[in-house]
Amino acid sequence: MRLQGKSLKRILTAAICTVLLAMPATALAAGETIENVADNSVTLQYLDRNNAPIDGLRVRIYQVATAKGEIYDGASSGYTLSYELTSEFKQFEEGTGRAPVTGFSEQRLNEELIIRPGETVVERRARWQAIAATLRPYALADLWPTDFQYTSNGRVNFTNLYPGLYLVIADDRPVKEDDADYRYRYQPTFVAVPGYANGAWDHNVDFSFDNNSVLRVKYTYTREVYGYKVYKRWYNDSGNIRPREVRVDIYRDGVLYRTVYLNESNNWTYDWDAGSGNWYVVERTTGSDYSVNISEKEGAFTLDNTYNPPPDNPPPPEEPPEVQGVRRDPVVEEEPEVLGMRRLPQTGQLNWPVPVLAIAGLVLFGTGFYRNRRNA
């Protein structure tokens, strides 16, 4: 059922603010709902390693899923809130998508990202951070963001958001320190709005520093590199089912830099030297039976492909069992027709007396013929 207007007052979820940041799960009271209107906002703050704000940093936000379903009914079944992937992100769903991402599916999203009372996200955080990191290059290369802004005093504030799950992606920030070049890369972050904190719903989720929290977008800080490499690893398959080659698009600062093809002849690897920039790679032609995980460290991009075999063919239907008191007609296999000949129907007549009668007729005919010669 699609949520409309005031049909829902406040959808129930716990710790819905974020999954990948250190947000604790929060129990909700029964009966609270949200309106499915664009009255939500989210504020994020980007700091450097000295806790100074980063200004002029471009930050994009993409809607990954919409919030749908029913409210929490207070029963033992718990929350009935669920997410539905948007059409833009449906293409990345594992097993069915055009560019399936390892571990990313609507079912798993609902099983693991809706945090319920008593649950923690520690064991899930690393897996979903890997999913966010893989979705990052696809979103930057192929999708138009829901909104984008530039940080001011280290902050961005996205407004007019519908309830749902969002992916926030910031540009890299190159800096020079001690006559050396460094680069900040901020982690892509899943954010769900609205949030619930201090016993009340908050449609204006704030991830900045204040007296009540120590939340910020995480980052890596590394020396600039000028040599790059992309290589592929295969899992859960054998060489005879792999594609002969895989197309990889290499992007620099949002512009397609080069398209390469990885295969056995180049050991599924490609190297290039170029200047610094916001580099990322996108895999294009693996096929729906494989899912991909993309990671990067100091200029080395790793494409991990896992084979997900399709379901086995269903077994042939079994012979229907005999039922007491029911007569089953025998199956009669038709003999093949011979071209130009017509088969006569069987009448049930027995054929074995025919040769006996023929011989007897010959004997009688011969006996009569002999007697007639003698009497002549």
Image (cartoon, grey):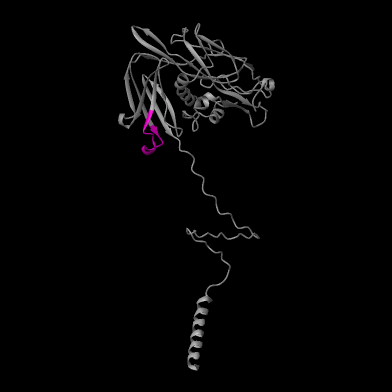
Which residue extends farthest left? 265
Which residue extends farthest front? 376
> Is 367 located above or below residue 58 in the figure?
below
Query: Is 14 displayed left or right of 227 in the figure?
Result: right
Q: Quadrant of the N terminus?
A: top right
Depth order, front residue of 181/239: 239
Query: Is 4 displayed left or right of 145 in the figure?
Result: right
* Image location of residue 259, percent across then percent down: 37, 23
* Image location of residue 35, percent across then percent down: 66, 19
> What is the quadrant of residue 269 in the picture?
top left
Depth order, front residue of 71/265: 265
Q: Decide if residue 375 is in sight here.
A: yes
Instruction: Decide whether residue 162 is among the magenta residues.
Output: no
Instruction: Decide whether residue 238 is among the magenta residues.
Output: yes
Query: Count of labels shown?
Result: 0
* Image location of residue 46, percent across then percent down: 48, 11
Which residue extends farthest bottom? 375
Q: Decide if residue 198 is in sight here.
A: no
Which stretch is magenta?
Answer: 234-246
> Is 219 located above or below residue 360 in the figure?
above
* Image location of residue 116, percent across then percent down: 59, 26
> Is 210 located above or below residue 244 in the figure?
above
Query: Is 352 displayed left or right of 181 in the figure?
Result: right
Query: Is 33 displayed left or right of 256 in the figure?
Result: right
Residue at point 48%, 17% (across, down): 169
